[in-house]
Amino acid sequence: MADCFLQPGELFTAQGPARVKTVVGSCLAIMVRVPRLGLTAIAHCILPRAGARLDAISREEALRYVDTTMDLILRSFARRGVATADLEIKLFGGADGLGLPDSGGAYRVGARNIESVQALLAARGLTVAASGLGGRRGRAIEFDTGTGDVFIRKLPAPAAWERP
């Protein structure tokens, strides 16, 4: 079984068993799997929206964003004849641990990532099989593409923001 460490803005695809590890804070780990075919995609998305259509930006740029990454994954599975009803979707991350003072919540990247993926999935009638979203702590994730099992270890809580 192959092992892979997924960096921010990367996508890993497999047809067969592999172990994929990543660490997310405000980013999202998005796993899409077709158990009967052994097809899997896992992405590490950084920001909620690209502000451009998938075909208007490079693949590298698209993989940074929740919306364009989901479009890329869903198109890839559709080209293989996979029906949306066959997709098993799992989501992890979206923590907002920075807690910047006086920001009024403007930075809330984690919450915005969660809102983006949930809206996108709802618009397509897709449901989530498992998730661990939000909070203030990042997560170390290990995903077994063969079984669909996801192992999560929460990272230590961030220190309180201190003013100089």
Image (cartoon, rainbow, N blue to C red):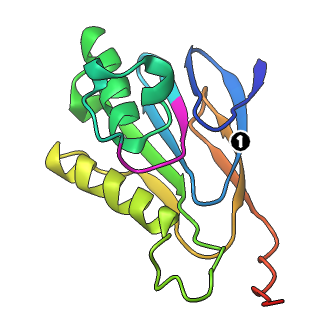
Q: Residue 58 placed where, x, y %?
A: 42, 18
Point 38% across, 26% down: residue: 73
Q: Which residue is identified by label 1?
A: 22
In the image, residue 125 above or below residue 163: above
Q: Find residue 7 and report its horizontal and vertical position in percent.
A: 69, 34
Query: Vertical placement of 138 versus 69: above or below?
Result: below
Q: Amino acid at mark 1?
A: Thr
For residue 86, what is the image quadrant?
top left
Q: Give the side of residue 71 with respect to residue 113, left or right.
A: left
Q: Residue at x 20, y 53 (%)?
A: 122
Nearer to the camera, 5 or 37: 5
Q: Relative to 10, does residue 88 appear above or below in the rendering?
A: below
Tag 1 secondary structure: strand
Could you say which quadrant of the image residue 32 lies in?
A: top left
Query: Who is closer to the viewer here, 34 or 51?
Result: 51
Query: Residue at point 33% right, 55% down?
Result: 116
